[in-house]
């Protein structure tokens, strides 16, 4: 399979699974108001996919030394924080609003890469301005605006930008043995799940059982439907992220991955707005359109400069 076909397949699957995750996650969060517990449960659900793959020999089990684990653990911390803040944002506001704010992720990636010594040409950086303007315009009159949702989405942008940069470096120089892109995300998931467990027990532990009982009563379809939606959110969270890591391994820079992530958010925006019948103001729709147009312009300009650099 050539690179273009493989990348297209990964992107299509990534977008499809991400839509399923966002719809199931928001459905669960509406009845179960404990975002840290929900985020942790989704991470642990990934183990139901990871462990059988290793046990059945479907993929090699990675071997990591103490130094290797420390390198991966740094990335896992940002993965943990980013996921928890995303779930908090989705729980505190609408899916559409969270993804409007998270469309600013390329800005964080570009700024961080600049701080690390990787600079983009001025015309490329200028194409980030429409994204900033569009996100700001959409946020100002968003009907479902809440500060926890806004700050959670912005915090997750920063965390995931750092994760993408260092994940790309790990994939360029994999520590240990058999740390493929899929195994890297598997190890990140295991570490992140373990990191969230004590935090959940301390901050939300006493509330979990009463919240579950209330969720069983309020969720459409009762206990079985709620648990099915919870399981779906966990499984699709893991599989869409694994697919994203496969896509990241084919992209030239973390910022390119962030742009693909932003296009994905448009798909989620449309799907969630239709599914949940979310109202959006005209200014919010216009801001979203400007931000998406900025992402498209950014991609075209960056692609041209990358082509020129190769020719040189």
Image: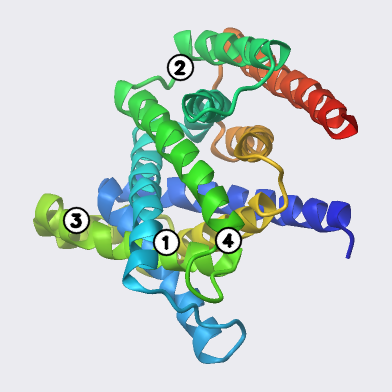
Residue on which disc 3 sits: 200
Q: What kind of element bears circle 2? A: loop
Residue at figure coordinates x 52%, y 42% from the top left: 165
Q: What kind of element bears circle 3? A: helix
Circles 4, 3 touching at the beta carbon (< 8 Å): no
Label 2 and label 3: CA atoms lie apart by 31 Å
Label 1 and label 4: CA atoms lie apart by 11 Å
Of the residues tagged 3 and 1, which is closer to the observer?
A: 1
Task: Inspect this view and state whether residue 222 appears.
Answer: no
Residue at figure coordinates x 27%, y 45% from the top left: 33
Task: Inspect this view and state whether residue 239 appears.
Answer: yes
Of the residues tagged 4 and 3, which is closer to the observer?
A: 4
Q: Is residue 80 left or right of residue 8?
A: left
Label 1 and label 2: CA atoms lie apart by 36 Å
Of the residues tagged 2 and 3, which is closer to the observer?
A: 3
Residue on which disc 4 sits: 242
Assess disc 4: are there few (<14), some (14-19) or many (≥20) residues with their C-alpha within 10 Å of its C-alpha: many
Q: Sequence-wise, which precedes: disc 1 or disc 2?
A: 2
Residue on which disc 1 sits: 188
Extreme-bottom residue of the structure: 56
- State the quadrant of the N terminus: bottom right
Circles 1, 2 touching at the beta carbon (< 8 Å): no
Q: Sequence-wise, which precedes: disc 1 or disc 4?
A: 1
Q: What kind of element bears circle 1? A: helix
Q: In which quarter of the image is residue 121?
A: top right
Q: Sequence-wise, which precedes: disc 2 or disc 3?
A: 2
């Amino acid at each position: 399979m050539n690179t273009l076909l493989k990348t297209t397949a990964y992107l299509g699957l990534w977008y499809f699974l991400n839509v399923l995750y966002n719809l199931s996650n928001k459905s669960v969060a509406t009845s179960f108001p404990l975002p840290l517990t929900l985020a942790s449960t989704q991470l642990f659900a990934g183990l139901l996919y990871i462990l059988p793959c290793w046990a059945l020999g479907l993929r090699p089990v990675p071997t990591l030394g103490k130094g290797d684990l420390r390198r991966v653990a740094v990335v896992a911390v940002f993965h943990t924080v980013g996921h928890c803040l995303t779930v908090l944002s989705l729980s505190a506001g609408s899916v559409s609003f969270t993804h409007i704010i998270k469309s600013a992720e390329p800005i964080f990636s570009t700024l961080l890469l600049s701080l690390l010594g990787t600079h983009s040409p001025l015309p490329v950086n200028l194409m980030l301005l429409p994204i900033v303007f569009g996100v700001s315009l959409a946020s100002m009159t968003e009907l479902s605006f809440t500060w926890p949702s806004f700050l959670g989405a912005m915090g997750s942008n920063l965390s995931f930008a750092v994760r993408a940069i260092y994940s790309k470096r790990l994939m360029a120089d994999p520590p240990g043995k058999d740390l493929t892109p899929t195994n890297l995300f598997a190890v990140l998931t295991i570490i992140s799940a373990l990191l969230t467990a004590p935090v959940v027990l301390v901050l939300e532990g006493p509330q979990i059982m009463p919240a579950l009982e209330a969720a069983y009563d309020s969720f459409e379809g009762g206990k079985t439907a709620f648990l099915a939606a919870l399981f779906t959110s966990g499984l699709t969270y893991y599989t869409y992220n694994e697919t994203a890591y496969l896509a990241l391994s084919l992209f030239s820079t973390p910022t390119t991955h962030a742009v693909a992530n932003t296009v994905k958010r448009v798909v989620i925006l449309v799907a969630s707005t239709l599914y949940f019948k979310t109202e959006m103001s005209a200014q919010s729709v216009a801001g979203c359109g400007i931000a998406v147009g900025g992402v498209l312009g950014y991609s075209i300009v960056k692609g041209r400069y990358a082509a020129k650099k190769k020719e040189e």
